Amino acid sequence: MELLYFLRSHKRFCDLQQVTHDISPTTLTRRLRELEKAGLLKRTVIPTFPPTVEYELSNKGEELRPMIDLLTHWSRRWVGPDREGRLVTDRTGRVVRANE
């Protein structure tokens, strides 16, 4: 859910790594592939050297935006963000309670 929240505009892999700091690159890649396979995001490869990859919500993912926003608001209220305002996740990408 957190990944979908941050995909409000085109994001590169490194941008997503910064906002999902507790997820390993391997797990992040796996999650992005799952979301792409489910049709919730689009992956665009830009032919540069090295290649640049951007992600954005697909039309199907955009339809989920109001629900994603509501769930994110609920999570921040009841689970709590970290000091930078991000949701805290464990190594598998699951949201966990913020340390206070």
Image (tube, rainbow, N blue to C red):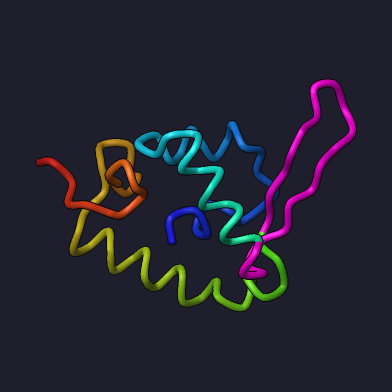
Residue 45: in magenta span: yes
Between residue 68 and residue 34, name the one nearer to us: 34
State which quarter of the image contains the C terminus: top left
Residue 54, above or below 63: above
Q: In screen coordinates, is 23 left or right of 45? A: left
Q: How many marks?
A: 0
x then y, percent, for residue 59: 72, 73
Quarter-wise, where is residue 34 in the image? bottom right
Quarter-wise, where is residue 82 in the image? top left
Residue 44, above or below 83: below
Residue 2, above or below 47: below
State which region is magenta: 37-56
x then y, percent, for residue 70: 39, 73
Between residue 24 and residue 1, name the one nearer to us: 24
Between residue 82 and residue 13, name the one nearer to us: 13
Q: In the image, what residue occupies the spot 72% across and 43% down? A: 54
Q: In the image, what residue occupies the spot 31% across and 41% down? A: 91
x then y, percent, for residue 76: 27, 58
x then y, percent, for residue 89: 30, 46
Residue 59: in magenta span: no
Q: In screen coordinates, is 73 left or right of 11? A: left
Q: In the image, what residue occupies the spot 36% across and 49% down? A: 93
Q: In the image, what residue occupies the spot 79% across and 48% down? A: 44
Quarter-wise, where is residue 48 in the image? top right
Q: In screen coordinates, is 76 left or right of 38? A: left
Residue 36, above or below 90: below
